[in-house]
Image (spheres, grey):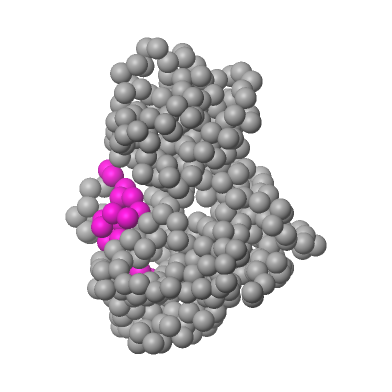
Amino acid sequence: MNQHGCTSLATFLDDRVIYRNLDVQDPSLPSFHQLAATLSLPANRIPRTGEPAHALVVAELLKHAQELDHPGKALQNLVFVGNSQGNNSKTFANICQAGNWHGIAFLSNENTDFEPDIKSKYQQGLPIYRTNRWFLLEFFEAFCNQHAIHINEQTTVVLNLDKTCLGAFGRNDQAIDHARALAAVGTASSTLGTAIDVAKVIQAYQRFNLVDFYDFTGDNPDILAYLCLLVSAGVIEPETLVAQVRLGEWTSFQAYVEDIQTRFNSLPVSIQPTHTEFFASLQNGAPLTFKAFRLLEYQLTSHFVQSAPDIVPDADTLSKILVITEEVRKFGLDCKTKGALLFGLSDTPDEAALPTPELAQKGYLPLHRAEMLSVSSEKK
C-alpha cells in the first residue's frame, strides 16, 4: 500500500455531498423539502437509495448545481464511480433515467487473489464496468471516450462515498464495518444498562452483515444493530435466526419485526422503549430507524479517522483506520480540472456523517471535511 499524505473529500467535492436525508451540504442548493414541493413528492417521506423518487431528487440537484456552475450548459452525461456492493448499479441507472442522460459506471471490489480484471455489461442500456482493482480507475476515462462520453463541462461525475471514496470496498471497508459493530455494542450496552457479551455481539453483527443475509436485512446497518440488541437482551440467538431465514420461515425483516411486536410484553422492559421507537420509525418509512446507534456510529467512525502522516498502511492497519481511496480522489481531481460537475452521494444517515452542534463545538467535522490519510494499492 502507498500513502499520499493527509487530505479530505472536500478538496474535490467541496460541500456538494448528499447524505441519506437528501439535504445537500452546499447551502446554495435547494433542500429536499423545497425539491419535494417542486417535484410533487410527499414531504413527509424521504425516498431511499434505489427508489425512482430518490433518483429524481438527485437529478434535480445536479441540474440546479450545473446551472450555478455553467449557466446555459445543460448536462448531457453522467459518470458514476461506486463499489460492487449493494445497489450501486441500480442507483446509477435510475439517476441517468431521471436526468435523461447518457451514462457509464465504474464499480470495484478489490480482490488481489485474482489477476487484475475488468468486465463490462449493460444495465438498462447503460455500460457498467466491474473491476477487482481500484487502480484500474485510471483507465476508465478511455472507456468513457469509447462510449462518446467525454468528461467536460457538460458531464457530471457522481462518486459514491460509502466504501468508495472512503473505506474502499475490498481494501478498507472493514474499518467502516468495525466502527458500526462497536456502535451496535455500545448502543446495546447503554440500552440494557448492564454488561453484555461484547464478543458475541460483534460476531452477531459480522454474521448478519454477510452477503447471504442481505435479502433479509436489506444491507441496512440499522437493522443489524437492532438484531444485535435482541441478541444482547437474550431475545434471539444469531444462528437460530440465520437458520430460520435459510429455511424460509422469515422471508422479510418486516414480517420478522412485526412478529416481535406481537410479543412486545414478553420483551425485557429495558429494550421496550427502543423497540417501540424503532418499530414506529420503520412503519413510517423513516430514513433513520435507529437514531442512538447512528449517533454513536458517527463518533466511533470519527475516531477511526487517521491523519498521522507517518502511518504505514498495511492490511492489518487498514482494518482499524478509515482512509480516503487515493485512486478515487485523483480521478475526482482530474475530472474537476476538466470542468465536470462533481457530487458525492451517500446512503449514510446524516446523523452518522455530521456532528451534532455539541460535537461540532468540540471540533468534530462532517466526514467529508475530516482530514485523513489517502491510500492507494500497488498496481499489480
Query: Residue 202: horizontal and vertical position, in percent?
Result: 59, 35
Q: Which span of residues is magenta-colored? A: 44-66
Query: Residue 316: horizontal and vertical position, in percent?
Result: 71, 53
Q: Quadrant of the C terminus?
A: bottom right
Q: Is residue 254 above or below residue 72?
A: above
Any magenta on residue 295? Answer: no
On the question of residue 14 being in view, the answer is: no
Q: Nearest the camera: 28 or 215?
A: 215
Q: Is residue 135 above or below residue 283?
A: below
Q: Quadrant of the N terminus?
A: bottom right
- In the picture, measured across the screen, residue 243 lies left or right of residue 168, that is left
Residue beneath the point at 35% across and 72% down:
121
Residue beneath the point at 26% across and 69% down:
124
- In the picture, measured across the screen, residue 224 lies left or right of residue 59, that is right
On the question of residue 247 being in view, the answer is: yes
Q: Quadrant of residue 178?
A: top right
Any magenta on residue 49? Answer: yes
Query: Residue 111: horizontal and vertical position, in percent?
Result: 57, 63
Q: Nearest the camera: 317 or 194?
A: 317
- In the picture, measured across the screen, residue 88 lies left or right of residue 184, that is left
- In the picture, measured across the screen, residue 85 lies left or right of residue 296, that is left
Magenta stretch secondary structure, dominant: helix
Q: Quadrant of residue 116?
A: bottom right
Q: Quadrant of residue 51?
A: bottom left
Residue located farthest toward the left when viewing the structure as drawn = 40
Residue beneath the point at 56% across and 64% down:
110
Q: Exactly how many numbered labels are in the figure?
A: 0
Residue located farthest toward the right when viewing the structure as drawn = 310
Residue beneath the point at 42% across and 31% down:
243
